[in-house]
């Protein structure tokens, strides 16, 4: 008898929890599940390696992503209101997003490197479409919870066509796009896929991954379309958009910091610029716990034993991975796909 009553109570509790859960917005459902899983320390099982799906979005477009990502977020990101003082750093993954986010944040905070070292750049710059930003919480919800008077620093890897509608239409706020040559980017992405043990699919071998990258069979889809579209928009919106390349940052960090400060309409002294440059060298940023994703390693979302997030920070590392054949094939495809581009990339630092 006791058993039957107990069982009935359990069934009622479970059913009403399920019904209540279903009334929640998808974003809140995922946030709740993630919070519970992080509290219980079982995030590894909840955020297991996903499969990529071609997901249909509210605006009729599709994007290749882990399903959970989009289930809640991108349709809602499309609706996000943009403010005039929003700062958006956009890029294809592994283009140097974290580096530029840190630079931009410092420029906007008068080179306050002490404050920058006190909180993670991933909390200061919110990854808007992230389901779970490597253990930092759902991006959109974090942004929605920011106090009205706080300026918003937004990071995204979304293709231009999937940015918030208002941002696409109006060019409100200030946007910085970061681009990196696709050979180094692909190598960096390969290591990233390996070490993000929850959240991205297994990359397979280098040659399998390269082939998937070339066929746009990776999260966020085609690198070519991503960069090309942002570059086109940049030609029409130079007052509210800035385009920076990883290779130029490597070549002359100080000059790029100055240009970025100009774009952001911040007057900084030479001493402040120098402080930002020193803080943002690879040697310094890669050991900075508030920039190098140590938290994600600690939470088990990334595995630094496989690869560090701040891995090598070089131009030309691709030469250690591409075979002669792979390189020839890539070059042929690259020439073909970019023959009409005015944007040029540097692949070799010695040139
Ligand atoms: P590697 O894997 O080639 O080392 P993102 O932030 O977009 O994910 O990009 C990460 C890449 O930027 C990594 O590339 C990382 O090492 C590199 N990076 C980050 N900070 C850097 C810096 N200060 N100088 C050079 N490269 C940097």
Image (spheres, rainbow, N blue to C red):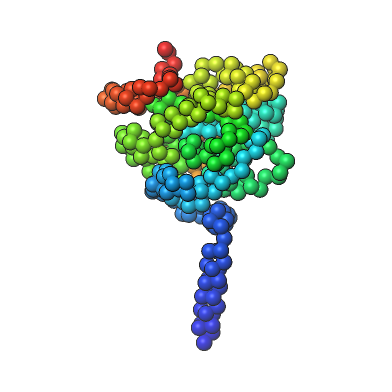
Q: Is residue 17 something that shows in the picture?
A: yes
Residue drawn 53% across the image and 56% down it: 26
Q: Residue furthest top?
A: 351
Number of on-image labels? 0
Q: Is residue 100 something that shows in the picture?
A: no
Q: Residue 96 location, x and y as percent?
A: 51, 29
Left of 227 or right of it: where is 258? right
Q: Quadrant of residue 155?
A: top right
Closer to the camera in the image, 175 or 46: 175
Residue drawn 51% across the image and 79% down it: 7
Q: Residue 277 location, x and y as percent?
A: 61, 21
Q: Residue furthest left?
A: 325
Residue drawn 52% across the image and 79% down it: 8
Where 24 falls versus 301 (above or below)? below
Residue drawn 56% across the image and 63% down it: 23
Q: Residue 157 location, x and y as percent?
A: 50, 37
Q: Residue furthest bottom?
A: 1
Closer to the camera in the image, 208 or 295: 208
Q: Quadrant of the C terminus?
A: top left
Where 317 falls versus 137 (above or below)? above
């Amino acid at each position: 008898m006791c058993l039957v009553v107990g069982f009935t109570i359990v069934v009622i509790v479970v059913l009403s929890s399920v019904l209540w859960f279903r009334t929640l917005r998808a974003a809140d459902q995922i946030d709740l599940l993630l919070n519970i899983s992080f509290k219980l320390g079982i995030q590894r099982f909840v955020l297991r390696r996903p499969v990529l799906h071609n997901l249909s979005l509210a605006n009729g477009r599709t994007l290749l992503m882990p399903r959970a990502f989009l289930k809640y977020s991108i349709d809602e990101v499309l609706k996000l209101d943009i403010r005039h003082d929003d700062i958006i750093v956009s890029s294809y993954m592994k283009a140097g997003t974290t580096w530029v986010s840190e630079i931009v944040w410092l420029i906007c905070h008068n080179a306050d490197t002490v404050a920058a070292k006190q909180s993670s750049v991933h909390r200061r710059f919110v990854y808007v479409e992230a389901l779970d930003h490597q253990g930092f919480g759902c991006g959109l919800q974090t942004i929605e919870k920011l106090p009205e008077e706080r300026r918003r620093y937004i990071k995204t890897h979304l293709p231009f066509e999937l940015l918030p509608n208002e941002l696409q239409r109006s060019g409100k706020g200030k946007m910085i796009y970061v681009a990196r040559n696709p050979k180094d980017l692909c190598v960096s992405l390969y290591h990233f896929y390996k070490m993000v043990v929850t959240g991205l699919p297994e990359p397979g071998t280098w040659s399998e991954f390269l082939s998937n990258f070339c066929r746009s069979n990776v999260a966020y889809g085609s690198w070519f379309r991503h960069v090309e579209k942002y570059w086109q928009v940049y030609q029409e919106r130079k007052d509210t958009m800035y385009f920076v390349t990883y290779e130029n940052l490597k070549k002359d960090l100080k000059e790029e910091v100055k240009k970025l400060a100009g774009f952001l309409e911040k007057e900084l002294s030479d001493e402040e610029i120098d402080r930002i440059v020193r803080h943002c060298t690879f040697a310094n940023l890669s050991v900075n716990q508030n920039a190098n994703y140590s938290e994600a390693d600690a939470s088990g979302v990334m595995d630094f034993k496989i690869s560090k997030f701040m891995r090598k920070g070089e131009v030309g590392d691709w030469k250690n991975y591409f075979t002669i054949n792979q390189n020839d094939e890539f070059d042929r495809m690259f020439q073909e796909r970019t023959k009409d581009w005015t944007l040029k990339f540097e692949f070799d630092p010695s040139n």
